[in-house]
Image (tube, rainbow, N blue to C red):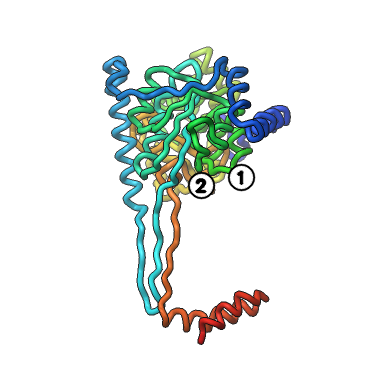
Amino acid sequence: MITKAQNWQRPRFADDSTLIDSVATILNDIADEGDTAIERYAEKFDGQKPEFIELKSFDEYQLDAELSNAIQLAAKRIRRFAEFQFESLTSRQFEDDYGFFGQAVKPIEKVGAYIPGGRFPLISTALMTLIPARVVGCSSRVACSPSDHPAILAAASLAGATQFVKLGGVQAVGALTNGYQSIEPVDLIVGPGNAWVNEAKRQVQSKVKIDGLAGPSELMAICDDQQPIDWLALDALAQAEHDPNACSLIVSDSQSWLTEMLSYLEKNKDTRELIKNEQVALVYANNKADMIAFSEDYAPEHLMLCHNAVKADELNNYGSLFIGANSAVALGDYISGPNHTLPTLGYAKQTGGLSVNTFVKIQTIQQVNKQGRETLSEAAKHLAKAEGLEFHFQSLVARCQ
């Protein structure tokens, strides 16, 4: 089925009040009871108490050679991009007639990285969440995961985790927020998770900074009729397989190309089901302007630009932009370098993805000289008076003399 752009709406997901209440109960118990509650919930949901695992060097895990090489290349690429980003975050200052003024860029000290479990090890998550923290100099980098798969441990070691705890779910978020045994409460929690972990992160954000709330994976591909049908179809299917609520949109102003794409996808029973459930949707736009407007309004997590008439600088709302059919989103998921933790559900209109920026704080510094004290205080006292703040006013009057 080919849908017109003006008729498409992002799926809405209802809040689960039972889940929200259950998460709140677990977090409140952990806040009140500490380690006892963490261990009780770990035994209930993970089947065992939390286990601290001492990480070995990467080579000691003796992974399959091809996997080992791939992990090391991915780590190198992610680190290179993080270092590139960090170069733009500099401590700077200027001096004028009134004194010295500047900013200091400092790492957040204690970071917790959540690495989900599952049937397969999410190696890339360990790399993407821990490497930027190491690059900026976060002193404590605690990894929590319900999985102790050797590839996860090896990746966490290579990425620079200072501690690794086999612990998952809401109880892991509670442990990172409140502390557990040798783990001090962290200042920042990063990393994706299931609905329970996501809700736990949402509820603790008054106590600790979080990287964001990840929804189902999203892809939009803007295509002309010169693009390889099979490549783009596989890109769409790759994102759709993340989650039953994931959504891939293939957008084009070529009705004939979309019809070919539909025929290609409908050859396979499994892909027909994805189309039926609108996990993969083909969207027709009348022209270039409509494609751009649709993309800007949707603000997808991943945006593939495979249309010669549309330029990158005409697009503003996306988590990460992949230009040209060579730039498979799966490369961004694993190895190209830019972080794969990206805003979903339209939040790309207001924020970017996980980056070195997430792991730093920018602080301001000022040292006012005698001339600045006298001249600026003379002006500022009138603002204090207008705002009715008497002691502000007196503090400034005293410095005018």
Task: Give whichever of 240, 87 is nearer the camera.
Answer: 87
Q: Quadrant of residue 42?
A: top right
Q: Counting residues from the N terminus, which is met first, the one under dot 2 or under dot 1?
A: 1
* Residue under numbered circle 2: 351
- Residue 220: in sight, yes or no? no
Compared across the picture, whether 65 is left or right of 281 comes to left
Frontmost residue, 193 versus 27? 27
Can you give x and y, in whole percent of width and height, for residue 214 in the image?
54, 35
Q: Which amino acid lies under the numbered mark 2 shown in the image of this protein? A: Thr
Q: Is residue 351 left or right of residue 78?
A: right
Q: Nearer the viewer, residue 14 or 62?
A: 62
Q: What's the residue at 38%, 71% (across, down)?
A: 100
Count of numbered badges drawn on the protein? 2
Of marks 2 and 1, the one in the foreground:
1
In the image, residue 270 sits, relative to residue 57, either above or below, namely: above
| 45 and 268: which is toward the camera | 45
Q: Quadrant of the N terminus?
A: top right
> Alpha-carbon neighbours of circle 1 within 10 Å: few (<14), some, or many (≥20)?
few
Q: Name the secondary structure under disc 2.
A: loop
- Find residue 131 and report its horizontal and vertical position in percent: 37, 36
**In this rendering, position of residue 5 left or right of residue 165:** right
**Disc marking residue 206:** 1
Judge whether 398 appears above or below 19 on screen: below
Q: How would you rate the neighbour count of disc 2 (Cα within 10 Å): few for under 14, some for 14-19, many for 20 or more?
A: some
The type of residue carrying mark 1 is Ser
- The residue at the point 40 percent across, 68 percent down is 101
* Residue 38 in sight: yes
Residue that appears at 33% across and 33% down? 336
Cα separation, mark 2 vs mark 1, equals 19 Å
Please state the horizontal and vertical placement of residue 327, each as a whole percent of the image: 35, 33
Quarter of image, res 28: top right
